[in-house]
Image (spheres, grey):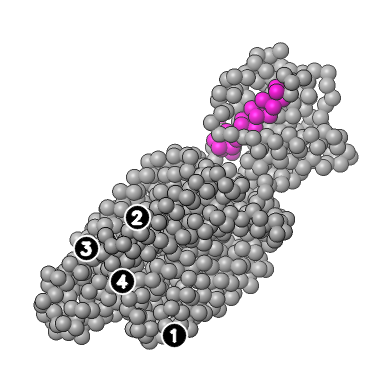
Amino acid sequence: MPDTLSIEKTGSYGRSRDPLDDITHSTDQSHSCDPTGNFTDSPSMQESQEYLDLDPGSEKIGDTPSPDIARDLEEQAEKAAESAVDGQRADSLHRHNSYPIPPLAGLTLQRTLTHRSRVSRLSHHSEEQSGDQSGNAMNSETPALPGHVTQDHLSQTRRYLICFMLCVCTLLVAIDETIITTALPEIVAALKSSSGYTWIGTSYLLACASSMPAYGALADIFGRKPIILLSIALFLIGSAIAGAATDMGMMISGRVIQGIGGGGISNLVNVIVADIIDLKYRGTFMGAIGATWAVGGCMGPLLGGAFASGGQWRWCFFLNLPIAGVCFIFMAWLANIKSPPTTLRDGLKRIDFLGIILITCATVCLFLALDWGGVHFAWNSAPVIVCLVLSGVLYIAFVLCEKYIPNEPVMPPRLFTNFSRTGALLCTFFHSTTFMAVSYFTPFMYQSVYNKSPIGAAVYLLPQAIVMGLASAISGYIITKTGKYKIIMIVGFSLAAIFNGMIVTLNPDSNTAKQIMWVTVWGIGIGPNFESTLIALHTHIKSQDIATATSTWGFLRTIGFSIGIAIGGVVFQNKMQTENEELGHLLPADLRELLTGADAAASTTLIKNYSEPVQKVAKLMYSRSFKDMFWTCLGLCLGYLFVFLIKERPLEMKDAKGETTETEDEVDQIVDVIVDDFEGNQKHRDGA
């Protein structure tokens, strides 16, 4: 009996060799693919599939296995896929290197290599007819694990059209997150509630973040198409309510519904792209989505300023109705995406309701504490302390719940058991926090410190939108061409931190060039990392975890958006309070009251109605407050250092001939399956 693992395609056992050599060699010239991930098998691979021997003197398994053997193969592949455990591969290989690989494992490996883009879904159909010709087994379907359905039936044209409509959906959501920044003073004045100005933006982002983990589970259970259509419908309804609002309560209600829909759109966009686009080409498409997000985020203030200047702020929300309606119709028609065969009753049983409730309540408590602290209540007051403590307790309860209770948690703990995944998720959080804090409050700075109108402030932000979108698109293209994403992340984060520091230097006497330039070049650093962190995350997960991992990524990104606004608002308001106590005696009594705490940001357009000396004092107060806020953002840039936790894995590896071979993750997973299959076979022998 040979003393090493071996895989033989013909005859009896031959010379011993390293199984990894078989893995990498067997994929040489075996596949070709187009940008949408459709794989075809080369003649050499089809010929190599001709037959396998079980062991000396045993029955050969070719392309026409008997029904019993086919069932055995399917059952064994399913067990292997379910029992694969990361980290045990090397020990298991060393421990059992004196036995040959059982034949069924060899066949599982051989068939697995024909589906390199779906290697983690190793349950195979063996329904070939006895009259099929050699090589037909290569084209048998590879059904996904529960919750993940392959989309090989989609044509390339349909995939591109789906991606285009997903970009339109992304544009809507991105615009909606920032469109109110320049229109906020007019909205607050019309609804006669200055105290609720922060919640117009925060309520949307809070609802978006809280709902996002649930969408990942729902998409796995019921499929992608019905869930994204539901999300678009909710976004449309919320937009109508917000646009028709007659008081602050109605406005916030509409924004919450919008946020719930926006959370689903933001999540499902990335999930669907990951489903229909192969990882090798995903950088280009996600770069386009990131560019759309960046452009939309910067177009929002421009559109909001235009509507506000004309006294038509309600169109900030009504604008969504026709576009969202078109998106709904086209996605219903285009997105012919397969869904898992799950009934409503069975699906509801699988939803992690407890986890969803815990994380939602924890997030709400956190935001209440951040919104109240130092503005409505002192930081050491009972309401703030209770909310902070309750938030921490609920988050801990959520972690314990996800670890021990549900079979299908909304945020699986395994996503955080790897340094690379954790690093990608933390980078996402800090990137979104700094991006939203700067983007949300920069229009206020232009209006208050530099006397710009809402439309003027938006025009100042237009160059930033252009360079941010270009940076995102170009970085996605580079990632696709080179397969390298970590260097893109490091360069982007470095530039973002440097130019954030330059924004801190702005003051009331800064010339127009500096006012525009520092904010614009900051966008060069922010743009590349809108989607690169998600690509980094995808290289460290298995295909059946795409929805939950993307949901977690989206949740942390949206939480970052919300916390960016909340932290920025807290720092700004507290500093304005301090400045008012120091310089308020130089202001008229009515203006001094308006520039206090929560009313300060809502009063940016009012200071131009006062005399020049009064305006100068007010501008100085605003400038110092914004400077403190930008300093806080610069401190948050330290979170970018988590990028060094990420171990870069190539989107593909090429052999000496330039042909695509298996990625590092795929080789790991294949060996896991072989070892687990072998160990099960050995236990069976020992028991016999």
Q: Which residue is mark 1?
A: 246
Pointers 3 and 1 in contact (CB under 8 A)?
no
Q: Which residue is mark 4?
A: 443
Side (left or right) of 559 relative to 340: left
Identify the image quadrant of the C terminus. Answer: top right
Between 92 and 500, the residue placed more toward the observer is 92
Q: How far apart are the alpha carbons under marks 3 and 1?
A: 35 Å
Q: Which mark is residue 525?
A: 2
| Comparing labels 2 and 3, the label whose residue is closer to the camera | 3
| Comparing labels 2 and 1, the label whose residue is closer to the camera | 1
At 35% from the left and 84% from the top, the residue drawn is: 192
Q: Which mark is residue 627?
A: 3
Helix, strand or loop for disc 2: helix
Badge 1 density bin: few <14, some 14–19, many ≥20, Cα 10 Å: few
Residue flagged by tag 2: what amino acid is it?
A: Gly
Instruction: Give percent across and percent down for residue 107.
Output: 73, 31
- Which span of residues is magenta-colored? 656-683
Q: How far apart are the alpha carbons under marks 4 and 2?
A: 19 Å
Residue flagged by tag 4: what amino acid is it?
A: Pro
Q: Which of the 4 quarters of the picture holds residue 233?
A: bottom right
| Comparing labels 3 and 1, the label whose residue is closer to the camera | 1
Q: Identify the mark nearer the N-term, 4 or 3.
A: 4
Q: Identify the mark nearer the N-term, 4 or 2.
A: 4
Q: Is residue 28 above or below residue 93?
A: below
At 81% from the left and 30% from the top, the residue drawn is: 61
358 drawn magenta: no
At 27% from the left and 55% from the top, the residue drawn is: 634
Badge 3 density bin: few <14, some 14–19, many ≥20, Cα 10 Å: many
Pointers 4 and 1 in contact (CB under 8 A)?
no
Side (left or right) of 376 relative to 69: left
